Amino acid sequence: MNRILIAATLATSTAAWAAPAAVVQTRDVPVNQFLQGRLKVQIPLNIPVPVEYAQSAVKRAGYSYWMRPADAATASAEKLPNRNGYMYASTATNVTYDARHKVFYGIDDPGSLNKLKGAATNIEVKQFKEGKFPAVMLSMISGTTGQPAYFMYMATGVKNEVFFLSLRAPDGRPDIGAAVWAKLAANIK
């Protein structure tokens, strides 16, 4: 009986110390709004943006940044708020989409994936290539920072043009990054 009581106590105390799953409150922002109207077409995609983030005035040609307003006051394209996280998107990308072969050249072709494996670990690739706007989502651990990195590339349907979206979770927390990324995956049609 004593052993059962000790085991139950240990199980309860262990469960109390386990980290709770991240509950990330987000709001859906249409991708064209997120990118400040830079897309040439309307894409029916909502970006799950953490509720405390707002569009910032950080300047870099072709880019749109979202972060906490307090962080935006001191942020620049060269000095982003890693501690509290941020999101950004751009139409300025080296990646192109080949609809005939269903390949994002520069990201999910074999040569690019091999280069990526030299710069990151724990690389996960999720493909969405059957819809009107094909996409590829990546999550990985950066070889430079040791923190999770999240990227999505989506074809616009205009020639071979692509836009990308990136998330830097607060303090590099993978639970928050994974929660936001799962919501984004659910929004891709």
Image (tube, rainbow, N blue to C red):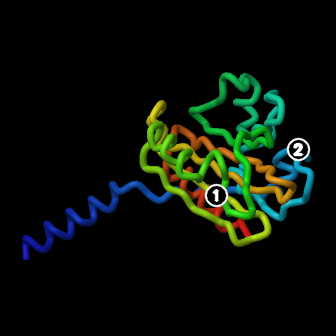
Which residue is outermost to the bottom? 1
> Could you tell whether 118 is left or right of 96 in the image?
left
The residue lying toward the viewer, choosing from 26 and 145, is 145
The residue lying toward the viewer, choosing from 20 and 125, is 125
Res 62 quadrant in image: top right
Which amino acid is tagged 2? Gln
> Could you tell whether 31 is left or right of 141 in the image?
right
Per the model, the C-alpha gap separating discs 1 and 2 is 22 Å
Residue 19 placement (x, y as % from top left): 40, 54
Where 82 falls versus 162 (above or below)?
above
Where 5 falls versus 172 (above or below)?
below
Residue 189 placement (x, y as % from top left): 74, 70
Task: Identify the residue under disc 1.
Answer: 136
Which residue is outermost to the front? 100
Where 34 falls versus 41 (above or below)?
above
Crowd around label 1: few <14 · some 14–19 · many ≥20 (10 Å): many
Q: Please give the label number shown on residue 49.
A: none
